Image (tube, grey):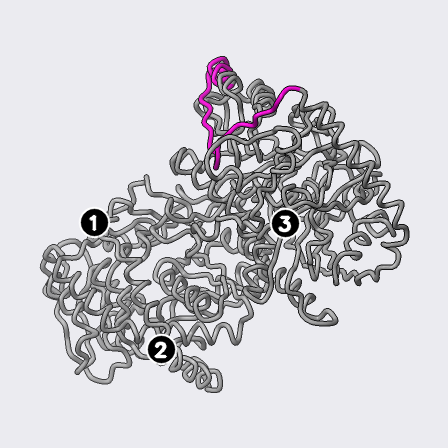
Amino acid sequence: MSERATREETVDVVWSGSWVAERLGVALEGDGELQELLGLALRRNPKRAHLLVSNVLGKHVPQRPSVVHGAGFELGERVRALLGDREARRAVVLGYAETATGLGHAVADGLRDAPYLHSTRRPVAGVEQAGGFEETHSHATSHLLLPEDRDLLAGGGTGADASVLVLVDDEFSTGNTVLNTIRALHALHPRERYVIVALVDMRSADDRDRLAVFAAEIGARVDLVTRSTGTVALPDGVLERGQALVAAREAEQAIRAEGSPGAVEDTDSAPVTRVDLDWPAGVPDGGRHGFTPSHRAALEAALPAMADRIADELGDAAGPAPRRVLVLGFEELMYAPLRLGTTLEAALGADAEVRYSTTTRSPVLAVDDPGYAIRTRLVFPAHDDPADGPGDRYAYNVAGAGFDAVVAVVDSTADTPELHAPDGLLARLAEHTGHVLLTVLPSYVPATAAPTGVPGTPTPAPERQEPAVLPEPLRGPDFSSYAPQDVGWLLQDLSDTELEAPTEEREEAIQSGGAHYAESLPVEYQPSAEYQALFTAALEASAARIAHAVGTVTETVLAERGPRPVLVSLARAGTPVGVLMRRWAQHRHGLDLPHYAISIVRGRGIDATALRWLAAHHDPADVVFVDGWTGKGAITRELAAAITEFEASGGPAGFDPEISVLADPGGCVRTYGTREDFLIPSACLNSTVSGLISRTVLRADLVGPDDFHGGKFYRELADSDVSGLFLDTIAACFDEVAGQVEAAAKELLAADRAPTWEGWAAVERISEEYGIHDVNLVKPGVGETTRVLLRRVPWKILAKRGVGADLEHIRLLAEQRGVPVEEVDDLPYSCVGLIHPRFTRGATGADGKAVRGA
């Protein structure tokens, strides 16, 4: 996260803890950021008078959603750096109800691959408790642990095999809650390491010593990650004096309220509008029963459309568009409203100020003074049938804050008559804003819960589309050199498996029928300095041309498959193109398109497990398959046949088998950036221009029926990686070609783009004319010819007479491999690569002699 995104907003010059400090002698002592992060208030609590009020938590103080999420995300990134990538992938994050449920979830986001669970004070009928603990200083003490997956907290076993447990709270004040948690869970599932995360560490020296003693006692390492550190200095008698001050102020407020009857009744109330967000099926509304990385990916994909629905409703309201909007969460339901807020904040931009906070069970004194953290208080009855019975609930710093609109987000369990009552939350909000929007998220209930209709049982979310056994996408930097947001690889990591075989051995096995080409990998070609210089020169010369094609194909996709298509690249050649299309959409339109890479294998079809994953997380109709270029159209036909077979076998329907490509010299598709056969520099290299990822692998002993196809991450080639250079060089030309792209896209959209299959006819002719009699050994186009020279045993190269710079790297590779280049006329491509049709080792090259080393 950038420094700008994570820096909290400070509005008041006066410290929001000065009122309490002056009257009770309470003082915060610590680093320079402490008073910016925390204010002080007084609470009605027999155990502790003061309340540390966070300015970046989004609980009591409305704050920009990006600041709130950024504070937790940054802590998660620090935990990941502390643990290292391998341990971070195995970590489990546990947040505390109610205040830290959203913070813990944001920390899990920063860790990226970690499942998340938060404790809860809401029992769910039929869900077995996996643990619990006490929070001794809180007004409500009992925490329940109700994971849907009973193995989540087990963390893979015991001792050294158990995952790291990351515990997240908003403040680390005495350490009692954390000690109680670790003690309870360690007895059930011992592990060697725990990490405690908090916004602020306010422990005394004695408390710090106590934690160290406890860690030694259980034989585990306990690390601490916090944003700020300090202590609270409390004078003698502060509890009693604080309680007396609270009683006196509440008595004064009651007298003032009696002296102004009817004030609320005379106020016009704002309209309340219900907004249906179309929450993604199978995604929990929070971490009460667990939240996995696949849930996270599905939510991320759905957020823009949900935020747009809110924005549209705000824009439809009578009167001027709201300038100041509050997204208000509900007690433990903090994360979903927070992410709706961050997305709405980005969508509205400078047109509105978006803030985020939540309702709470905590009774806190309100004092309208700039030196006090809780300026106003709304009181309303509980509306979720709480287990501990009816009682008051609160929303702080909402009244009088000048919000033009409030978006109230609750779960379906809390959508009760009490919510809509004359004294309920919605009515109280309507007294203080111009428009109230209500959105209700389906309360997620595990399959083990009691059936609906049982009193107190929440409404279950829609049935999941797929079982939880589906694997998760891989992302950089753990898998590939691409940024994690650039692409999610629907592959399994086979980096530690020996898959490479000499080119000649592979070719003999493939042509003899002894093995399929996808069962092994060629040895990665390492370019000479001369060849690398050719790549660099070609990239510089063609960057604008490629940017033009990227823009054209992306604009065509957005026009025909919008508004937010899901890009799915055919790994690996399609992946750089998919990343560039995603960057174009973001740069030119502000769209954050999901992008994945999927494996398709000629003769074996597409990865069915990956298709099921996509259908479980996105609407199949939104999926747009992307590839780099077409040759003769074999993959185009393969994909169409594979989708038909997938649906016939019972797979989810709705996928469109059409492929969108950068270049379509073969005339095989409708959606393309160009039909010229020119050099795309990403075709010149293998993994070093494709995120250091291998071609995909499909072998029965490595890939099971529910596994993704495999791939390798060549970390050892990092010094030769030009993936980022390729992307950045082309993206730098986006603005330069924008005007030309707009015109080209309009022309294409109005043109007849029906496939001509001209390339297929040419390949069949060449196959017969050269006595090959197998179209699979004829590889047309610059990209496919390059692949022949890098991966297969080439026989000869056909080059269209007069083609110059686009074939310089082809001629160099052919020279290095001892392969003749034959100039020909009447060729619809710039070149065609011919694989040796009768290969056995010792019969390579056109003259039957062994090739020279590349």
First in sequence, mark 2 or 3: give its number. 3
Was residue 268 drawn as part of the magenta stretch in this picture? no
Q: Amino acid at mark 3?
A: Pro
Q: Secondary structure at mark 1?
A: loop
What x and y, as percent, mark residue 122?
A: 73, 35
- Range covered by the magenta-colored residues: 211-236
Q: Nearer the viewer, mark 2 or mark 3?
A: 3
Q: Secondary structure at mark 3?
A: loop
On the picture, is 828 further left or further right than 297?
left
First in sequence, mark 1 or 3: give its number. 3
Q: Residue at x 59, y 35 (%)?
A: 95
**Residue 502: which numbered mark, if any?**
1
**Which is more toward the observer, 147 or 842?**
147
**Residue 62: which numbered mark, if any?**
3
Toward which corner of the image does residue 723 lie, by quadrant? bottom left
On the picture, is 530 further left or further right than 240?
left
**Which is more toward the observer, 662 or 835?**
662
On the picture, is 809 further left or further right than 617?
left
Image marks 2 and 3: residues in contact by CB distance under 8 Å: no
- Is 315 located above or below residue 252 in the figure? below
**Residue 737: which numbered mark, if any?**
2
Query: If the image is split into quadrants, where does the C terminus sit?
Result: bottom left
What x and y, as percent, mark residue 83?
A: 41, 33
Q: Nearer the viewer, mark 2 or mark 1?
A: 2
